[in-house]
Image (cartoon, rainbow, N blue to C red):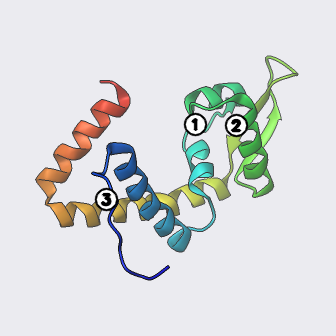
Amino acid sequence: MTGVKRLPAVEPHLPMLMGMVFARLRAQLAEDAPDLRPSQLRVLEWLPDEGLTITELAECAEMTTQGCGQFVRQLDALGMVEVTVAHHDARARVVRITDRGREALVRSSAVLRACDDAWAAQVGPERWRVFREVLEEVALGS
């Protein structure tokens, strides 16, 4: 494949456009903050200091408990989280972010802020603000 930027054969629909933007974010994160993959970041970002059970974390991240458990095992192996037995239920596990995980979040957040800033500069701050407000309203249902 050549380095020529190709355009889709159809008019880009929203999922296609979102996928293209997300691909740019993934590439930037891989280059500037390679500690975490975006899928791992998605799980780590939901953890408050007091931690959550894997079931609670899965619900927050909108994934299955089994899938979330796989990410938690990866993050634990990377030293980004610690997993302990829940006080209220010996069968449940509580996941807490570690200092290493917090540092990875700080680096990833800086990359995401830089992308935000670059896109705001590209389309203008007012258009970017409105875009973000509308996206938040649609995504969060507010």
Q: Is residue 24 left or right of residue 101?
A: left
- Farthest residue, direction right: 90
In percent of the image, x 70 and y 53: which residue is there? 80
Residue 62 placement: quadrant:
top right
Q: Residue at x 38, y 57 (%)?
A: 21
Inspect the image, locate mark 1, and give the three-letter code of the amino acid beneath it: Pro
Instruction: Assign a secondary structure to mark 3.
Output: helix
Q: Is residue 83 left or right of residue 55?
A: right
Judge the density around disc 1: few (<14), some (14-19), many (≥20) Cα neighbours within 10 Å. few
* Residue where numbered disc 2 is placed: 68
What is the C-alpha distance between the residues marked 1 and 3?
Answer: 24 Å
**Residue 134 at x, y = what percent?**
23, 37
Label 1 close to label 2 by CB (< 8 Å): no
Quadrant in which residue 115 is drawn: bottom left
Q: Which residue is mark 3?
A: 116
Q: Are marks 1 and 3 in contact (CB under 8 Å)?
A: no
Q: Secondary structure at mark 1?
A: loop
Q: Does label 3 or label 2 sit earlier along the sequence?
A: 2
Q: Secondary structure at mark 2?
A: helix
Q: Please, what is the three-letter code of the amino acid marked with disc 3? A: Asp
Quarter of the figure that contains the C terminus: top left
Q: Position of residue 64 (x, y in %)?
A: 67, 29
Depth check, front residue: 124 or 86? 124
- Looking at numbered disc 2 in the image, what kind of residue is underneath it? Cys
Image point 19% across, 52% down: which residue?
128
Q: Which residue is mark 1?
A: 48
Where residue 63 sits, quadrant-wise, is: top right
Depth check, mark 1 against mark 3: the one in front is 3
